[in-house]
Amino acid sequence: MNAGQESNLLGGPNTDDVGMKDMGDEDEDQGQGKEGASLRHRHVLEKQSLIEKGKACSFEGHKRQAGQWLEGPLQICQCDRHGSGSWVACIDTPPTAVDHDDDDIEPNTAIGRRQQFDKEDFVFDLLGSVPASITSAGTIQPVDVVNLPSLAGQGLSYSLFTIEPCGINLPHVHPRATELLYVIGGKDLRTAFVEENGGRVIVNDIGMGEVTFFPEGLVHYQQNLSCETVTYISALNSEDPGVITVSTQFFRLPNEAVQGSIGQDEDKVQQLIGGLPAGPAEGHSTCMVTCGL
């Protein structure tokens, strides 16, 4: 592509553009001696003057002096340093994103669904949020589609757990998600899950910097076996993972089912229901005594 073609892409030279003759060739024709030296000196002065007073280049109302650059819609070009008034040394500019009218966006697409949210709706103060569950044994602070609606369709959620010494995050199930757990601080966090009938019970004690996971739909729990606070985060591969706390939900079944399952009469069942703790729950007496609680 020559300079003329490049100039057309930017917007073209001035209508009064002039070319610049190469003075070097003419100098060679003048011979030697004082007259030749004087002529060469005059040509040099004329060339310097033309560069210094070089014609400005223009494009859509924008002017640039010799040697200056201008970015056009297709190219970035330099106003000829030799003062011809032409655009030279053009470089293609990368394509820019096309602005779309909001009215043209299909509301049922992912981008359409995001249009309903302001930029602040994509941020959530997890640490400063009100816990969804709070007891003397700890707190649970989730972020999911309920308190961050812009998560809808993203397939993830998050919870921050603070479990006090001996505290238990009661056995539960996430019906729609696998859980990945990472310990931020503390030690001796017991984690366990039980497989389907005929399977194993997987038990591990982990500490700061370690990770474990609980497969989707399996009963699992965590307990702080140490005498210091344990903090961990839980990531789930659903924005709406759901939670079924086994102890509380089991006793919501009809009495006949509960009585048959645990071999107790109705009075005993009601007594058990009345003593069910909220989670996180306090741990067993041995741990409490060890920690002086």
Image (tube, rainbow, N blue to C red):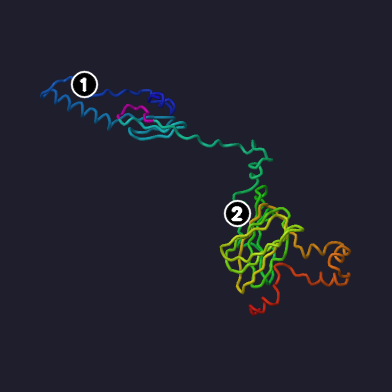
Up-down: is 53 above or below 238?
A: above
Quadrant location of the C terminus in the rendered image: bottom right
Percent of width and height locating residue 229: 61, 70
Residue in view at x 27 percent, y 23 percent: 21
> Considering depth in this image, is 41 or 27 the residue closer to the camera?
27
141 inside magenta stretch:
no
Residue 186 image point, x, y percent: 58, 68
Q: Which class describes the residues within 10 Å of circle 1: few (<14), some (14-19), or many (20+)?
A: few
Distance from label 1 to label 2 (Cα)?
Answer: 71 Å
Circle 1 is placed at which residue position? 26
243 left or right of 42 in image: right
Task: Reply yes or no: does residue 87 show up in magenta.
Answer: yes
Q: Quadrant of residue 47?
A: top left
Give the residue furthest to the left.
33
Rendering quarter of residue 26: top left
Q: Secondary structure at mark 2?
A: loop
Q: Which residue is identified by label 2? A: 123
Q: Which residues are magenta?
A: 82-89
Please name the residue shown 68% across and 54% down the image: 178
Q: Which mark is residue 273?
A: none
Residue type at mark 2: give it: Val
* Residue 91 place in picture, x, y as percent: 41, 32
Tell me where residue 185 appears, x and y as whole percent. Answer: 57, 66
- Quarter the N terminus occupies: top left
Question: Main structural element of the magenta stretch: helix, strand or loop?
Answer: loop
Q: Check disc 1 and give the amino acid type.
A: Glu
